[in-house]
Image (spheres, rainbow, N blue to C red):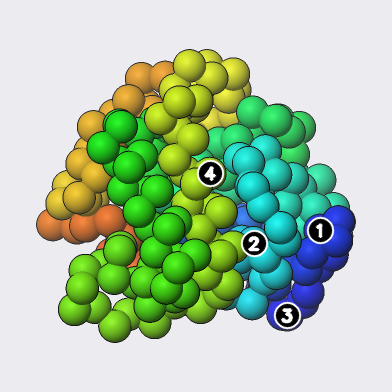
Amino acid sequence: MTATIDAGGHQLAVDVQGEGARPWLCLHGLVDDIAIWDRLLPGLVERGRTIRMDQRGHGSSDAPPGPYSRRALARDVVAVLDALGVEKARLVGHSMGGIVAMETAIAFPDRVDSLVLVGTASQCSEKVARWYERIALAGENEGRAGLCRAIYGEQSSKPIRGDARGIAQVTRMLKSLHDDPLTPKLPEIACPALLVVGDRDPMGTKASALLARGLPDARLVVVEDCGHWVHVAQPEALLAALDAWLPATEN
């Protein structure tokens, strides 16, 4: 079921499939959208009701005026849960989506059952913060083509769906991880967390290892011969990690 949800003045595109009392809610990374979960989706649906959402500025969702904070994107998650009548969800976040998932667990702990964090981080260096600002400026000045070149290189023509200015605001939200990292707040996240990262992720495995040390209840799985998009390149490995971890999350 595909739907549009009012998140307090802006609309968010949501896709819902499957059944189950402990739903998954999938949060994509920067410049991705609902479709990035297509290869993982059948396996998740076998394991419960699965909700995918285009985050603000991305895909078919609206881009309200900025600036955007991590807390604002977490409120979008709660708005989706409220609209669908979901009390608690298992948040599956890739990269930027993992940051939003962690912020949701900090700000709204009673709405988060557990976390699955794929190739994500809790902080960024000054160098990465400058890169995020270049991406944001490219989006504002050159639209989606500028975003594409800034992220993937001058020769790339990878299609990006969404509002370039909205995505620029989301990118500046990521930039905030330099001055206001999530790392000191990780001990506040009490729910179980599964961390999955490819051994060839350009971000490296150290960011996930840092999360594993900071989160009170975390398991780290490194997927061999895999890059940043584990859920695309090796969905079966991610599902296997889920199946090995899920029994430990049962109450």
Q: Earlier in the sequence, mark 2 or mark 4?
A: 2
Q: Earlier in the sequence, mark 1 or mark 2?
A: 1
Q: Earlier in the sequence, mark 1 or mark 3?
A: 3
Q: Which residue is mark 4?
A: 173
Q: CA distance from mark 4 to mark 1?
A: 18 Å
**Marker count (numbered):** 4
Q: CA distance from mark 1 to mark 3?
A: 18 Å
- Callout 2, which amino acid? Arg
Q: CA distance from mark 1 to mark 2?
A: 10 Å
100 and 150: which one is in front?
150
User: In the rendered image, which quarter is residue 249 located in?
Assistant: top right
x then y, percent, for residue 29 = 45, 58
Q: For the residues labelled 3 and 2, say whether their Cβ atoms are less than 8 Å apart.
A: no
Q: CA distance from mark 4 to mark 3?
A: 30 Å
**Vertical order, 94 against 160 (above or below):** above
Quarter the N terminus occupies: bottom right
